[in-house]
Image: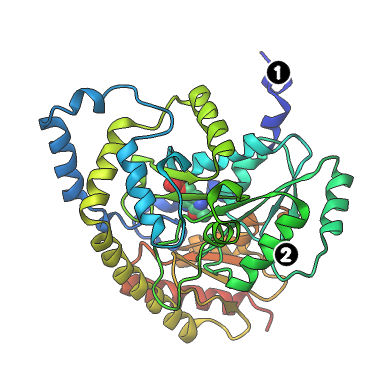
Amino acid sequence: MLDWEQIFASRSSRMKASEIRELLKLLDQPDIISFAGGIPDPALFPDEAFKEAYADIFSSGQVGSALQYSVSEGYKPLREWIVAEVARIGIDCTADNVFITSGSQQALDYLGKLFLSPKDTALVTWPTYLGALSAFNAYEPTYDKLSLNGNRTPEAYRETAAKAGGSVKFAYLSSDFSNPTGETVDLAGRQKLLQLADELDIAILEDAAYQHLRYDGEAVAPIMALDIARNGGIENTRTIYSGSFSKTLAPGLRVGFVIASMPVIRKLVLMKQAADLHSSTINQIAIEHVASRGFDAQVAKIRTVYSRRRDVMLAAMDKYMPKTATWTRPEGGMFVWVTLPEGLDGAELLAKSIATERVAFVPGKAFYADGSNANTLRMSFSCADDAMIEEGIKRLGRLIANALPA
Ligand code: PMP
């Protein structure tokens, strides 16, 4: 028998299925109330609009090019639509600065590949999006904790990176309604990050996957917009912005994008030529078709539904969670982040919860680069109706109260 491990590259050693993934496989069972998946509610997909889009593509003279290979940069009308859309939030760029990816997940893989040599340091929030850690892991980095309150000096980051055998390359964060905590970095935090990035001379990867899902409160300018404003244009920025149509239109089409200065875009285009040539031509055309005809109405529709679910989840938590637990009160997105008293383990609680209460969530330690903070949970409200949320939180509150020392 061939010993595969002997011939796999060292980078594959960090590609491991987690125990949590195994537990989450059980979620297909119909009686489980799941707050685990961070996915959009399929009932909210604009399926009629997509039906019309594909019908139009097939009945027009466009079908040949829609089914053909296309350029690695992405479908130009879609890139132009994105330019107009992001101009509304202060990101002033041209279509050349927009690069289409197969979901924003692909952007994370490419950016890991572009910046990280083995042993280099990626600064990430603590906790951070699990999919970003998985994407970066393939490039064998070290992680260090990104602090947004300015209480760590650039020298401290540099020293830690040098000890690990490389240098700091970028800071990654999901700036609005983050996955997993639901929290938003405020303006002061964004400015501190720009200053830190200047001092360390590193890139900022701003993951804006949830940017459109604000339910209340004031919008905060994207880091990319602040960077452009202070530099008088995108070409002098150090921020790389990634966006997605997954949470607003539909994730199954796999269309996302990156906005950056030309040196970064040129490298990404070369990477895409080597990796998958281009993202699906026909899906990019369909996304442009649907977005240009009804993006705002679609966003308004999903905001109404998700904001109500957020309210129902927070009200149920106030009612049923033991007072020793704390949780975030997000202004948007899909997640509430729960912190339990020290000593409780989210993974053990999940196993018990599935067995006895039939309620699922994601144990929080998976979101920490060092696997710490086992006493945390990520709860998603995007796919459950009001009654399920109320019942699920009631059961979970009971389970947590029983798990606490008397
Ligand atoms: N970034 C964040 C913060 C996410 O939560 C997700 C999806 N869960 C992604 C990126 C990737 O999404 P997609 O590839 O569908 O755009």
In the image, 72: left or right of 132? left
Give the amino acid type for the residue marked by disc 2 in the picture: Ser
Structural crowding at the residue carrying mark 1, measured as other residues with C-alpha within 10 Å and reported as few (<14), some (14–19) or many (≥20): few
> Residue 397, percent across and down?
51, 77
Q: Earlier in the sequence, mark 2 or mark 1?
A: 1
From the viewer's side, name the closer residue of 350 and 306: 306
In the image, 304: left or right of 52? right
Q: Which mark is residue 7?
A: 1
Give the amino acid type for the residue marked by disc 1 in the picture: Ile
Q: Residues under labels 2 and 1: Cα distance?
A: 39 Å
Q: Quadrant of the N terminus?
A: top right
> Residue 2, percent across and down?
67, 14
From the viewer's side, name the closer residue of 233 and 61: 233
Give the residue at mark 2.
Answer: 147
Q: Is residue 252 visible?
A: no
Residue 375 vertical placement versus 294 (above, below): below
From the viewer's side, name the closer residue of 196 and 228: 228
In the image, 91: left or right of 175? left
Residue 226 vertical placement versus 292 (above, below): below
* Snapshot quadrant of residue 372: bottom right
Q: Is residue 12 visible?
A: yes
- Point 61% across, 49% down: residue: 236
> Residue 294, percent across and down?
22, 56
Q: Secondary structure at mark 1?
A: helix
Q: Quadrant of the C terminus?
A: bottom right
- Point 50% across, 28% down: residue: 272
- Point 53% across, 60% down: residue: 179
Q: Secondary structure at mark 2?
A: loop
